[in-house]
């Protein structure tokens, strides 16, 4: 009998092969203010929302340049195979991201990936400036721009085993609500440091192997 899973994916450096927001800042930020904001966020001095807002304010980019940039973003070679495998077994797939809706939509469309349920922050491009909004923020918690924990809990079905796949600090709260966690990079360091149980992974090939064994 097939196990009932709900699988949650982070986007940056999990589905993609690098952190898209950090890379965009390197390419399009008009100054280096974003570096200090990143340091403050990692030290817990400011929230990810405050960090993102300040960082994105420094970006100047046209629609054409944005689309050209997004068309070059690479995803993990096993992501398509993994979601096809999960989909063939009726597994529910949800993407939880601290990135922005237009970025995710463009990248998935470019790679011909359809039908994924996505929770992310939102952005609008006006002339060459980015206007942000945070529809999934938690008004009772100022830590995160997107409360992935809230989004995860809203999508766990009755009797479903929740699996979280992520890499970073924005995944901390949500991942600790899941039944099983695949972690790498900063998320893995956090789990190891706090002696929490998780499964390390390097690429989604490792996760694909797990589900190939579990579902087939």
Image: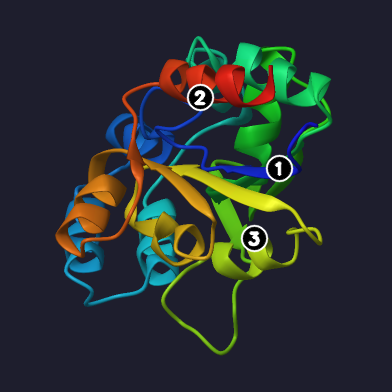
Residue drawn at the location 52% of the way across and 47% of the way down: 164
What coloring was used for the rendering?
rainbow
Secondary structure at badge 2 equals helix
- Distance Cα–Cα, label 3 vs label 1: 13 Å
Question: Would residue 20 appear left or right of 4 to someone viewing this image?
Answer: left
Q: Position of residue 59 (x, y in %)?
A: 41, 45
In front here: 185 or 99? 185
79 w.r.t. 156: above or below: above
Q: Which residue is mark 2?
A: 210
Q: Position of residue 91 (x, y in %)?
A: 77, 34
10 w.r.t. 72: above or below: below
Give the quadrant of the C terminus.
top right
- Quadrant of the image occupied by residue 179: bottom right
Nearest-to-viewer mark from 3 and 1:
1
Q: Position of residue 112 (x, y in %)?
A: 74, 12
Give the quadrant of the N terminus.
top right
Q: Which residue is mark 1?
A: 5
Which mark, by number, is residue 152? 3
Is there a contact, CB below 8 Å, between mark 2 and mark 3?
Answer: no
Residue drawn at the location 57% of the way across and 14% of the way down: 71
Which one is earlier in the sequence, the residue at label 3 or at label 1?
A: 1
């Amino acid at each position: 009998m097939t196990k009932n899973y709900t699988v949650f994916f982070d986007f940056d450096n999990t589905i993609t092969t690098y952190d898209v927001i950090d890379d965009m800042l390197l390419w399009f930020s008009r100054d280096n203010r974003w570096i200090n904001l990143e340091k403050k966020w990692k030290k817990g001095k400011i929230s990810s929302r405050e960090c993102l807002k300040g960082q994105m304010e420094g970006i100047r980019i046209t629609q054409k340049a944005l689309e050209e940039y997004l068309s070059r973003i690479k995803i993990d070679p096993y992501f398509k195979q993994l979601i096809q495998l999960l989909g063939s077994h009726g597994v529910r797939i949800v993407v939880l991201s601290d990135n922005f809706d237009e970025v995710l939509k463009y990248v998935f469309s470019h790679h011909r990936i359809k039908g994924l349920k996505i929770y992310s922050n939102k952005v609008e491009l006006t002339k060459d400036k980015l206007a942000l909004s945070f529809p999934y923020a938690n008004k009772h918690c100022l830590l995160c721009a997107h409360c992935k924990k809230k989004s995860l809990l809203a999508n766990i079905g009755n009797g479903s085993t929740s699996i979280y796949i992520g890499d970073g600090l924005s995944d901390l709260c949500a991942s600790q609500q899941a039944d099983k966690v695949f972690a790498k990079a900063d998320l893995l360091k956090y789990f190891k440091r706090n002696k929490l149980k998780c499964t390390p992974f390097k690429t989604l090939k490792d996760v694909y192997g797990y589900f190939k064994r579990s579902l087939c």
